[in-house]
Image (spheres, helix red, strand yellow):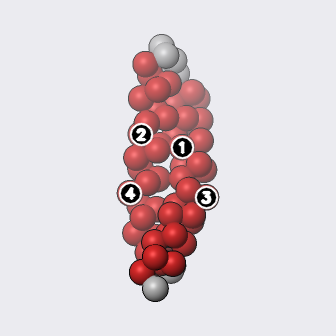
C-alpha cells in the first residue's frame, strides 16, 4: 500500500495545496505568509485523505 499511497499523495498533495493557494489569492491575500500557510494547510489535509483513499482502493482490489 505504500507505493499506492505515495503515487496518490503526489497527485492529491499538489492539487489540494494549489486549491488552497487559489482560494487565498481569490480572497485578496497576496502576502507570502498567507500563500505559504494555505499551501501547507492543503498539504496537511492531503495526508489523511490520501491514506483513506489508498486503503479503500487496496481493499476493493482484493
Coordinates of residue 11 in the picture (x, y in percent) = 38, 57
Q: Nearer the viewer, mark 4 or mark 3?
A: 3
Of callouts 2 and 4, the N-terminal one? 4
In three-dimensional space, the C-alpha distance between marks 2 and 4, rounded to whole angstroms, equals: 11 Å
Looking at the picture, does residue 7 appear above or below residue 25? below
In three-dimensional space, the C-alpha distance between marks 3 and 1, rounded to whole angstroms, equals: 11 Å
At a point 57% along the width and 64% down the height, the residue shown is 52
At a point 56% along the width and 65% down the height, the residue shown is 51
Q: Residue 54 got which mark? A: none
In three-dimensional space, the C-alpha distance between marks 4 and 3, rounded to whole angstroms, equals: 14 Å
Coordinates of residue 17 in the picture (x, y in percent) = 47, 43
Of callouts 4 and 3, the N-terminal one? 4
Q: Which of marks 2 and 3 is in front?
A: 3
Which residue lies under the disc numbered 3? 48
At a point 58% along the width and 29% down the height, the residue shown is 33
Cβ atoms under marks 3 and 1 closer than 8 Å: no
Name the side, left or right, on which 48 lies relative to 11.
right
Which residue lies under the disc numbered 4? 11
Q: What element carries label 3?
A: helix
Label 1: few (<14), some (14–19) or many (≥20) C-alpha neighbours in 10 Å: many
In three-dimensional space, the C-alpha distance between marks 2 and 1, rounded to whole angstroms, equals: 8 Å
Which residue lies under the disc numbered 1? 42
Of callouts 1 and 4, the N-terminal one? 4
Q: Is mark 1 on a helix, strand or loop?
A: helix
Q: Is residue 32 visible?
A: no
Label 3: few (<14), some (14–19) or many (≥20) C-alpha neighbours in 10 Å: few
Which residue lies under the disc numbered 2? 18
Cβ atoms under marks 4 and 3 closer than 8 Å: no
In three-dimensional space, the C-alpha distance between marks 1 and 4, rounded to whole angstroms, equals: 12 Å
The furthest residue to the top:
28
Amino acid at each position: 500500500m505504500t507505493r499506492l499511497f505515495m503515487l496518490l499523495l503526489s497527485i492529491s498533495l499538489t492539487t489540494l495545496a494549489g486549491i488552497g493557494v487559489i482560494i487565498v489569492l481569490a480572497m485578496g491575500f497576496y502576502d507570502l505568509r498567507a500563500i505559504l500557510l494555505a499551501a501547507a494547510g492543503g498539504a496537511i489535509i492531503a495526508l489523511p485523505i490520501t491514506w483513506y483513499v489508498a486503503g479503500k482502493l487496496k481493499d476493493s482490489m482484493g
